[in-house]
Amino acid sequence: MFLSLALAGIGFSGLACASTNSTLTLTGSLTTSSGVLEIPKGASCACAKLAHAIPQGFILPGSQNYTTQATDSYWDIRADLSPACIVIPSTASQVSQAVRIIGTCQAKFAVRGGGHMNYPGANNIDAGVLIALSKLETIDVKSGSVDVGPGNNWYDVYSALEPYGRVCIGGRMKTIGVPGLSLIGGFHYFNNKYGYAMDNVISYDIVLGNGTLITVTRNAHSDLFWALKGGANNYGIVTRFELRTFEVPKVSTTIQVFNETFIPDFLSAVCEAAKLDYQDPIAAGMIATITYNATTKIPQGSVLGVQAGVSIPPSQFTNFTNIPAIERINNITTMKPWADTLDSPKQTMRVQFSHKTMKPDAKVLYSIYKAWKDSVDKIADIKGLYPTFVTNVISPSSIRVARTNGVGNVWGLEEEPLIIWQFSTGWDLAQDDLRMEAWSRQLTEHLHSINKELGIASEFIYMGDAGEWQDPYAGFPSENVDRMRNVRSVYDPAGVFSILSWGGFKLGL
Ligand SMILES: Cc1cc2nc3c(=O)[nH]c(=O)nc-3n(C[C@H](O)[C@H](O)[C@H](O)COP(=O)(O)OP(=O)(O)OC[C@H]3O[C@@H](n4cnc5c(N)ncnc54)[C@H](O)[C@@H]3O)c2cc1C
């Protein structure tokens, strides 16, 4: 009954429902704003079986929640696609059931957590099955750790930890999803002391390609435990993360804004922040960006800094505090209200990320910024242009955590300071997609080639800041990539998470 009502929904045409072993088979096409999609046999088969197996969490095009799930749940408008059907499991065993069905039908599928990855196809799919994890929302605070379902965002987790005066290592913006960030690395304010989000996952429940649900810890399936520390969506669907927590009842925050005159000093302070290297560091980190208004021609640097404790102004930001600022607000607060101010609303623009990594060199970083700004001026005709120059620091102490914890991670970085320089560029119209990608890619590669000549380039690529044309695995040590591929062949020999779920940063076939 449910199925036949749903099938009457707009969007599908030529549907036939045939009974096969008491499940229904769909065939037909799906009309979207960008054309007509043919529904492949595998997706038809899987959708029909999923409708039967998980009726309360099953959505077809045209039904009430389809747009919410296929479009509104994505950060980047480019990620909006048209799945043949959507399944929203409420339990890990439903995830397992869904994966088994998808495998049996050989359907192409995608998995979505918080929907922030802006690599189109990483978390959504045309004419395939979308598994949306939004109903796996458990948060269970324990002593020294927290169990988190992949339907949560970081604000949910910080809010749950707040009454206990504890924090975990997660995202810096409020609504980023827990699963994507934890599986690719995880830049947080406190990386310098505790390492990356991935370094602080104590255990994973994961549904493998054959539908089996296993718990992975440093002692159980230790090879997969290692591979999940940065290995993205290559191994299965994580249905529970156990995250280490730390006692941080108060944080000292600083918001500082700088005008164009002081951008060289601002970038120099970013480089100095990367070089900070204490054996027992005070947990502190930041978001450091330069926005540029291509119409008014006004750039502005800003640092949003957070430090554990109550020292005010926060001692680890002296290099910024010494620069004359347009605005400077220091405050003592806790993680939850701070995170609450940093939203990243979904569906506001189309966005291209691209970045490279370098050793800290303030003069060169400034020249990269200048080249970016000049280049933005040349594309100022693009409707809705929203250019941002973002930096992320990798401090030696942040790397040391994985190098000394007996587990490691797939990045395999040396203990040296690095700076990620990233262009995050927003715009309005789909017709500009190819132009924006070409612009961003050419500029990034050109500037990186100069850094290579200077001997200060690093090949490290962070999946969270990367454009879809970038290959993070090429920047990992090759022995790590070989090991990741070996782990994949053990845990997913049929290639369910490589061939059927093909989107995102995959190890390659
Ligand atoms: C505005 C903004 C701010 C950001 N800030 C930060 C930051 O502060 N620190 C940082 O490190 N990164 C940051 N990022 C990058 C961010 O970490 C990645 O985009 C990350 O993938 C987001 O996680 P998600 O769950 O929202 O992603 P999704 O888009 O839902 O998923 C990302 C990938 O993971 C896969 N996946 C999702 N859930 C699971 C699961 N349970 N099991 C297996 N695979 C799964 C998806 O299939 C997809 O390929 C930011 C990105 C944006 C857009």
Image (cartoon, rainbow, N blue to C red):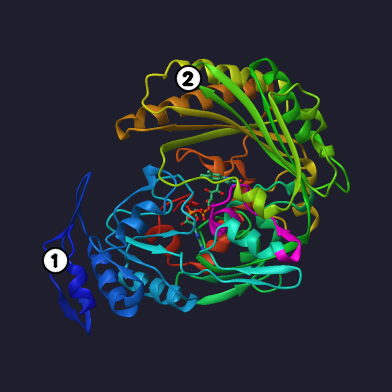
**Of helix, strand and loop, which one carries label 2?**
loop
Quarter holding residue 128: bottom left
Q: Say which residue label 1 marks.
A: 15
Q: Residue lying at the far bottom in this picture: please name it.
A: 22
Residue drawn at x 18%, y 68% is: 7
Is residue 479 visible in the rendered image? The answer is no
Three-letter residue code for mark 2: Ala
Residue lying farthest right? 279
Res 214 visible: yes
- Residue 320, given in percent of the width and then of the height, sits at 76, 29
Amino acid type, mark 1: Leu
The spot of residue 91 in percent (x, y) is 47, 76
Q: Earlier in the sequence, mark 1 or mark 2?
A: 1
Q: Which mark is residue 109?
A: none
As drawn, 246 above or below 285: below
Q: Is mark 2 within 8 Å of ligand 1?
A: no
- Residue at 56%, 76% (x, y): give it: 214
Label 1 beta carbon within 8 A of ligand 1: no
Magenta-colored span: 163-182
Q: Residue at x 32, y 67 (%)?
A: 106
Give whichever of 23, 388 is nearer the camera: 388
The answer to whether 109 is drawn above or below residue 385 in the figure is below
What residue sits 56% from the left and 33% below the top?
355
Inspect the magenta stretch and tell me whether residue 313 lies in it: no
| Residue 295 screen position, x and y as percent | 45, 18
Q: Residues within 10 Å of mark 1 (few under 14, many from 20)?
A: some
Disc assigned to residue 294: 2
* Location of the N terminus (image quadrant): bottom left
